[in-house]
Amino acid sequence: MSVELETTTITVTESAANKVRDILAQRNMATSGLRVFVSGGGCSGMQYGMAVEAQPREFDAVIEAGDGVKVFIDPTSMMYLAGANIDYVDNIMGGGFRIDNPNAVSTCGCGHSFKTTSSGGEAASSGGGCGHCG
């Protein structure tokens, strides 16, 4: 099994690492990690997804984020996420993970869906609605 350890491609904020740690502790899965992936769908053509997984898959990039928190990203998703920043925001409008992706040329209003130049995106803009936008 080949697992690549990444340290600089994707940034995970302290807030996001703390939230992942809390989620893993609540599920009694402290040694697991957070899988971040990109799949087709959403109102902008591509969408982000996250899941808890026990260990990385073959060829995954593994990002070590604060006090042993691990983030797993498959090679295809890494092509769309390179240089991204993963944060967790909790405010009066609700909390959630946010991905600031420099590869996205347009995003849905809620940030769950995006387009890149290679996926048919055009000028950088935000807007549009989807099932997540409220």
Image: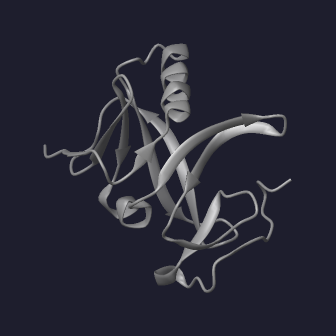
- At horizontal 46% and vertical 56% (from top left) the residue drawn is 84
Q: Is residue 20 left or right of residue 4?
A: right
Q: Coloured how?
A: one colour
Indicate the quadrant where residue 55 lies.
top left
- Work out whether residue 42 or residue 88 is closer to the camera in this orientation and state it: 88
Residue 111: x and y in percent read 67, 58
Vertical side of 20 occupied by 105: above or below: below
Disc tally is 0
Residue 122: x and y in percent read 61, 86
Vertical side of 95 occupied by 110: above or below: below
- Work out whether residue 131 or residue 69 is closer to the camera in this orientation and state it: 69
Residue 87: x and y in percent read 56, 42
Q: Is residue 127 left or right of residue 56?
A: right
Q: Is residue 106 left or right of residue 65?
A: right
Q: Is residue 32 left or right of residue 129?
A: left
- At horizontal 54% and vertical 20% (from top left) the residue drawn is 22
Residue 6: x and y in percent read 26, 47
Q: Residue furthest left?
A: 1
- At horizontal 50% and vertical 82% (from top left) the residue drawn is 117
Tell me the quadrant of the picture where the N terminus can be found: top left
Vertical side of 52 occupied by 43: above or below: below
- At horizontal 80% and vertical 56% (from top left) the residue drawn is 133
